Amino acid sequence: MTSKKKKIANAAFVVLVFALTIYSVFKGEDLRAVIRTILKANPLYLIPGVAGVVFFIWGESIIIHYMMGTLKIHTKKWTCFLYSCVGFFFSAITPSASGGQPMQIYYMRKNKIPVPVSTLVLMIVTITYKSVLVAIGLFVAFFQRGFVHKYLEGILPVFYLGVGLNVACCIAMSILAFHPALAKGIMMWCLKILERLHILKHKPNRTEKLSASMDQYNATAAYLRTHAGVIVNVLAITFLQRFALFFVTWFVYKAFGLHGAHIYDVVMLQAVVSVSVDMLPLPGGMGISENLFLIIFKGIFAAGLLLPGMVLSRGIAYYVQLLLSAAMTLFAHLTIGRRQKEAAEKPCCEAQG
């Protein structure tokens, strides 16, 4: 599939999922009543919710800037913020967030950051990001049985699937990082099976590409072993970053003038939604996130406020993030790498003059 056709297919898929989400969520509902209820929400509580989204994006940029510094790569904080926006935008519109990091590497390369360096930094970002979700999921599953029984009975299969997939992802990345020879053997075996089943066509250079990718994981392992303090700091920032987004639902809850539910319950329920949908092959967990919210927050939001609460919470946490990152991605496209291009063209112009 050509790049253009792939982009069209991705766009069509996002539009289809969005349309199905709107249909499933609002089917049989009075949209005017929902809108009227949303308009009654106290904006003073919604502002910190939006600020939480900005902090969520900014948090990753701080991690990127910090890690680039440890690798002796000079970057501006604003540029790192643009890298983060690019990642969040393309992650939000591609299944399983698969498009985010490749596009970040692309824009970092435009700023002359070596691909091995950007790959290493983003690999660490992914490992810590998944590790925080795994920690939350395992904590809830094993140490919050009362919480699980009270709120999660209706979604346990999805929740345990989400925890399992995130654990599997972390294990796979750990094997890739710390046991590259074993990982290479497993991947070569899987590759041969797929070729024998004619799922993949045999390509001689595929093995060379696989070996080259293994070098990146070797670099990741070496970095993890020699920069334990850096990893601890990144985990701490990632923890704050994740919970800044989870708190959006609490601010929406307060915006409707509700009280009675504990802040811990509201924030952890939103964390459960994130753990459950993070690895599912849908753009931003679209469709699943909304329906999970309507199930597990039924006992939190008062009658008539559940759907408006979901619309506001999801609207701020996902769609505000999507719009902001889209605007910043456009700005990044217009500015990143421009100075290098102008500097390269200047000597040519002077020579011609």
Image (cartoon, grey):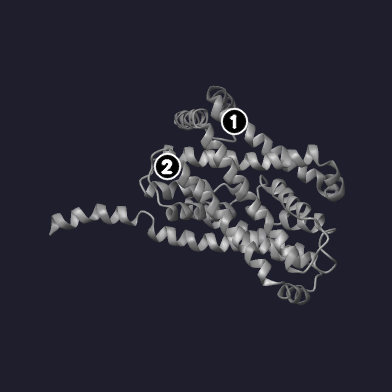
The amino acid beneath tag 2 is: Gly
State the image coordinates of residue 318 (x, y, percent, origin top left).
63, 59
Which of pointers 2 and 1 lies earlier in the amino acid sequence?
2
Say which residue appears at 66% left-offset and 61% top-offset. 18
**Residue 52 or residue 90, whichever sits in front:** 52
Question: Badge 2 is on which residue?
Answer: 69
Say which residue appears at 73% left-offset and 41% top-offset. 137
Spatial CA distance of label 2 from label 1 is: 24 Å
Side of 69 where 265 appears, left or right: right
* Circle 1 residues within 10 Å: few <14, some 14–19, many ≥20: some
Q: Which mark is residue 30?
A: none
Helix, strand or loop for disc 2: helix
Q: Is residue 18 above or below residue 188?
A: below
Say which residue appears at 37% left-offset and 49% top-offset. 111
Q: Is residue 235 above or below residue 307?
A: above
Side of 115 where 188 appears, left or right: right
The amino acid beneath tag 1 is: Ser
Side of 78 where 171 appears, left or right: right
Helix, strand or loop for disc 1: helix
Q: Depth-wise, is mark 2 or mark 1 nearer the camera? A: 2
Question: Badge 1 is on which residue?
Answer: 174
Q: Is residue 177 above or below residue 56?
A: above
Does residue 38 show up? yes
State the image coordinates of residue 141 (x, y, percent, origin top left).
78, 39
Q: Is residue 259 above or below residue 163?
A: below
